[in-house]
Image: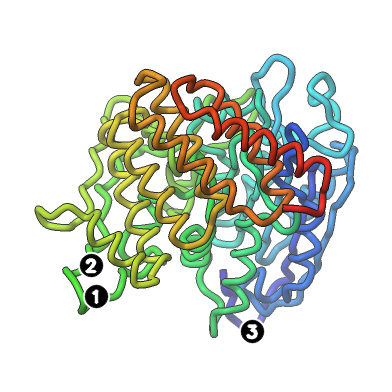
């Protein structure tokens, strides 16, 4: 979004903090912390432009009409515009529309106290192409998540490049800056030159340990395409050649990712003029969103290149040699291929969740490892008996990783889901459940302990 020329126009950064996202005392997103962190980043880096710019911070706002005025004012900016939104994504009582919850929003008052997501598209629709970026770091509440799964995307405006993540309910976030926003800022600070928005998003998703099932826009299939932003892994001279990054099949003509249209809204996935906001895929337990054009079926994704060899030994070798990021990227690439070709509840999809869990454990990310193992155990329990060896192994692994969590708050957040899984397995050694219950009680009694 670099603006060249002698007569540069004024830009604008609009940072919006909605309501915090918490569930059962589990913190998922603290938008005020995200805005505080973004306030430390130079505006020129946020906008990718050196033009004179204004910045508006909206933290704790509770009037939807006042927020609309601010959004409309920002949209009238003649130069580059960045709109950042963080907080809880909710829906109205009828469950027909998406909203960014504000500080006083409840389910019964969402229509009057929250920001209707369609307003974002309405206010930005007249912006010139290439001048607008929308970035969001959100968590969906329990009632909203099924609606998001139906949409398969979170549209904003055909005039904007759209990047961000929505985490599902029930997964622990960070008590400080959210993982996506934190790594987004880290990439800005680390790069010798400011990356293009698409590359910045790609590097952020690759580095952030996003929870399984997170809605990523654009999705993994787009961000692993050559030229998008994620470099192919470097060759490993100690083993087989690393797989090259797959080239996704071309989208059908006129297709795009869009949800059920909302009344009066001009929203949808960006067109070819803004390729960065393509269809979304979910990390871990969901399938890619289908194209809107029903008359032209979406092509099947290509298998990640690895010849006829099984990629798992090489991925394991990468992790063993300390190249955890490369191993995680390759595992996620293969997982998404399986999700799109065989379905999110297929046995192979569950196996790749378990592979990611093992890689997280090897890298020392016991929080993600615990969450992935619990998710894998729950998925297997739907299709297998409670005494199946694979189910029991997933539960034991989840328990072990949970015991390695040194952060008391993180352990308290994950504990109830783990114990719920252990209780569902009567043939598992009862010591696992007893020890887990005792530790969770101890953690609640001693907040600073571990």
Picture coordinates of residue 301 (x, y %)? Answer: 25, 43
> Left or right: 359 with respect to 298?
right
Which residue is disc 1 drawn over? 236
- Residue shown at the point (23%, 58%) measured from the top left: 313
- The answer to which image quadrant residue 77 occupies is bottom right
- The answer to which image quadrant residue 315 occupies is bottom left
- The answer to whether residue 62 is above or below residue 179 is above
Which residue is disc 2 drawn over? 242
- The answer to whether residue 343 is above or below residue 450 is above
Q: Quadrant of the N terminus?
A: bottom right
Picture coordinates of residue 391 (x, y %)? Answer: 39, 29
What's the distance in space between the residues labelled 1 and 3, CA to CA?
Answer: 48 Å
Circles 2 and 1: CB atoms closer than 8 Å: yes
User: Which is more N-terminal, label 3 or label 2?
Assistant: 3
Label 1 SS: loop
- Residue shown at the point (26%, 35%) measured from the top left: 341
Q: Pick the residue in front: 16 or 48.
A: 16
Within 10 Å of disc 3 (Cα), the crowding (few <14, some 14-19, many 20+) is few
Residue 422 visible within the image: yes
Q: Pick the residue in front: 287 or 235.
A: 235
Coloured how?
Answer: rainbow
Which residue is disc 3 drawn over? 6
Picture coordinates of residue 443 (x, y %)? Answer: 76, 44
């Amino acid at each position: 979004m670099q603006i060249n020329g002698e007569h540069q126009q004024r830009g604008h950064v609009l940072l919006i903090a909605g309501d915090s996202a918490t569930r059962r005392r589990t913190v998922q997103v603290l938008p005020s912390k995200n805005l505080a962190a973004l306030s430390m980043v130079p505006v020129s880096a946020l906008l990718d432009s050196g033009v004179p710019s204004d910045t508006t911070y909206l933290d704790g706002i509770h009037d939807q009409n006042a927020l609309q005025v601010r959004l409309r004012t920002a949209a009238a900016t003649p130069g580059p515009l960045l709109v950042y939104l963080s907080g809880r994504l909710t829906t109205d009582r009828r469950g027909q529309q998406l909203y960014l919850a504000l500080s006083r929003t409840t389910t019964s008052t969402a229509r009057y106290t929250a920001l209707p997501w369609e307003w974002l598209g309405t206010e930005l629709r007249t912006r010139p192409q290439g001048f607008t970026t929308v970035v969001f770091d959100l968590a969906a509440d329990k009632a909203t998540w099924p609606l998001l799964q139906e949409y398969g995307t979170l549209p904003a405006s055909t005039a904007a490049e759209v990047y961000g993540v929505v985490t599902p309910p029930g997964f622990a976030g960070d008590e400080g800056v959210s993982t996506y926003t934190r790594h987004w800022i880290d990439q800005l600070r680390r790069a010798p030159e400011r990356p293009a928005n698409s590359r910045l998003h790609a590097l952020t998703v690759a580095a952030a340990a996003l929870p399984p099932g997170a809605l990523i826009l654009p999705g993994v299939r787009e961000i692993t395409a050559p030229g998008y932003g994620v470099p192919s892994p470097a060759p490993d001279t100690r083993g087989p050649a690393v797989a090259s990054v797959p080239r996704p099949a071309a989208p059908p003509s006129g297709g795009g990712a869009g949800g059920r249209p909302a009344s009066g809204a001009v929203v949808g996935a960006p067109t070819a003029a803004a390729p960065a906001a393509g269809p979304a895929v979910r990390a871990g337990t969901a399938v890619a969103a289908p194209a809107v054009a029903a008359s032209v079926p979406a092509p099947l994704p290509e298998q990640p290149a690895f010849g006829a060899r099984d990629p798992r030994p090489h991925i394991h070798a990468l992790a063993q040699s300390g190249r955890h990021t490369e191993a995680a990227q390759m595992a996620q690439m293969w997982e998404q291929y399986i999700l799109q070709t065989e379905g999110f509840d297929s046995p192979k999809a569950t196996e790749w969740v378990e592979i990611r869990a093992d890689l997280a454990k090897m890298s020392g990310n016991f929080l993600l490892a615990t969450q992935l193992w619990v998710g894998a155990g729950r998925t297997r329990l739907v299709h297998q008996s409670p005494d199946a060896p694979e189910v029991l192994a997933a539960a034991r692994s989840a328990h072990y990783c949970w015991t390695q969590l040194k952060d008391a708050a993180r352990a308290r957040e994950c504990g109830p889901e783990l114990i719920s899984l252990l209780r569902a397995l009567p043939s598992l050694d009862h010591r696992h459940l007893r020890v887990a219950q005792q530790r969770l009680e101890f953690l609640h009694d001693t907040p600073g302990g571990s």
